[in-house]
Amino acid sequence: MQVEQVAGIAGALIFRPTPHVDERGFFSRTFDRDVLKNAGLDPDAFVQDSISRSRRGVVRGMHIRAGLGEAKLVRCSYGAVLDVVVDLRPDSPTYRQRETFDLTGENQVTVYVPAGCAHGFQALTEPADVSYRIDRAHDPSEDISIRWDDADLDIPWPLPVTLMSERDLAAPSLAAAIARLK
């Protein structure tokens, strides 16, 4: 498994697995505690695994947690998504910058999203399964959503948005989210 620093988001990492491919398909390691440890992450800090399944065109996000925030490892286990990370850590050299990633069930790439960064994605296939490994138990009182089409984010969603949660549709602007994070 190779580890790469993400240029556009300080502290974000990409983990590229080495799949073993043969006539049956492939086998790929998607989590390796030693690789995480060597990359400076505490593999024991992750306390929850979750998965979402989305229809083509669905946007989930942009989401961030108040308080201590949450770090996560994100991977598309089936299908394809455009994954988006926005750095909202005021002291970060990449503050308010965004980075996009093409995550697919074929490449099995994992993105490390540091605490203090907003995250979201759009499903590009029918369906798209996204797996998350999160470092804090969920506390709904800390959930913050940011409007998916906020002009300050200028996210290049590749497809028309087909469906979103009520919460994401009603999400406030980036400026309002930043004010709540302070």
Image: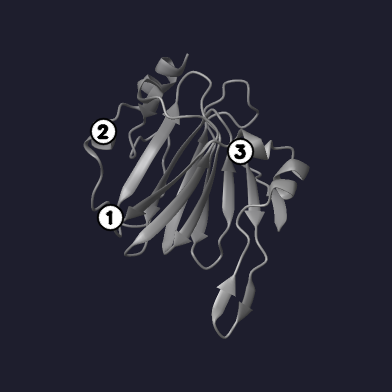
Query: How many residues crowd around disc 3 within 10 Å: few (fewer than 14), some, or many (20 or more)?
Result: many
Q: CA distance from mark 3 to mark 2?
A: 26 Å
Q: Looking at the image, what colour scheme do you see?
A: one colour
Q: Secondary structure at mark 1?
A: loop
Earlier residue among tags 1 and 2? 1
Earlier residue among tags 3 and 2? 3
Nearest-to-viewer mark from 3 and 2: 2
Instruction: Count how many numbered circles sit on residues in the image.
Output: 3
* Quadrant containing the N terminus in the rendered view: bottom right
- The residue at the far right in this view is 38
Q: Secondary structure at mark 2?
A: helix
Q: Can residue 165 be seen at all in this image of the molecule?
A: yes
At x 32% / y 57%, what residue is drawn?
159
Q: CA distance from mark 3 to mark 1?
A: 26 Å
At x 46% / y 39%, what residue is drawn?
119
Along the line of sight, which residue is nearer the eye, 101 or 74?
A: 74
Q: Which mark is residue 167?
A: 2
Q: CA distance from mark 1 to mark 2?
A: 19 Å
Query: How many residues crowd around disc 1 within 10 Å: few (fewer than 14), some, or many (20 or more)?
Result: few
The picture places residue 14, in percent across and down from the top left corner, at 63, 50
Along the line of sight, which residue is nearer the eye, 67 or 50?
A: 50
Determine whether 12 is above or below 82 in the image.
above
Please name the residue that numbered disc 3 is placed on.
Answer: 9
Q: Are marks 3 and 2 in contact (CB under 8 Å)?
A: no
Q: What's under tag 2, amino acid-wise?
A: Arg
Give the side of residue 173 with respect to residue 182, left or right: left
The picture places residue 53, in percent across and down from the top left corner, at 34, 54
Query: How many residues crowd around disc 2 within 10 Å: few (fewer than 14), some, or many (20 or more)?
Result: some
Q: Which mark is residue 160?
A: 1
Q: What's under tag 1, amino acid-wise?
A: Pro
At x 56% / y 25%, what residue is drawn?
89
